[in-house]
Amino acid sequence: MPPSRATSYRLDPQVKDALEAQARAEGISERALLERLVREGLATLRHPGIVYRDGPSGRRAALAAGADVWEIVSALRHTKGREAQRIAQLAEQFGVHPTQIRIALDFAAMHRDEIDERVAANDAAAEQVRLLSEGRAKLMAS
């Protein structure tokens, strides 16, 4: 990541107060919050239909109408066929219009590292659950 560049902006006092309060509530600096809001805002402008949500694993990109982008990308690995068929399968699976799937995939293509990290983290968590389940089953069998 390139080094930060000094930038100065004047904010409406109410916006500045709200920024301070939100940063304090999240336990982060105003600068970190402002950078996140700008980064996410630019991404949502480029990809209408994408929102960011908080959750146990942190903030992540999602369809406004449903699933997280990483979930769609992960499910894509388990679909077969041509592009249109795979998109139709995913749309049915997630209960959204195929256009929504295309929006998620376009976002994922532009933010590949972010999405791949989420998919990998989910895969690792699933593997931990599998190993725990196997270990529990072995204990129960003895």
Image (spheres, rainbow, N blue to C red):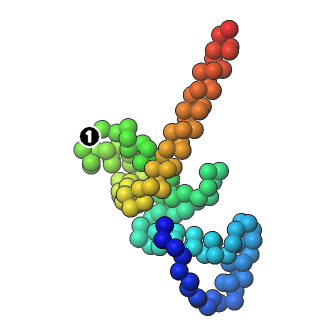
Q: Residue furthest front?
A: 3
Residue 6 x %, y %: 56, 83
Q: Which residue is mark 1?
A: 81
Residue 77 x %, y %: 38, 41
Residue found at x 57% / y 69%: 36
Is 115 left or right of 102, judged from the image as shown?
A: right
Q: Residue furthest top?
A: 142
Is 38 left or right of 132, judged from the image as shown?
A: left
Compared to residue 129, the image places residue 86 above or below, namely below
Residue found at x 67% / y 75%: 30
Compared to residue 132, the image places residue 61 above or below, namely below
Q: Residue furthest left?
A: 82
Residue 97 x %, y %: 38, 54
Q: For the residue carrying disc 1, how many other residues have a C-alpha within 10 Å: few (<14), some (14-19), or many (20+)? A: few
How many marks can you see? 1
Q: Which element is circle 1 on?
A: loop
Residue found at x 53% / y 42%: 122
Residue 40 visible: yes
Residue 93 visible: no
Q: Quadrant of residue 93?
A: top left
Residue found at x 66% / y 84%: 15
Is 74 left or right of 133, judged from the image as shown?
A: left
Query: For the residue marked with disc 1, what is the amino acid?
Result: Gly
Compared to residue 5, the image places residue 60 above or below, namely above
Quadrant including the C terminus: top right
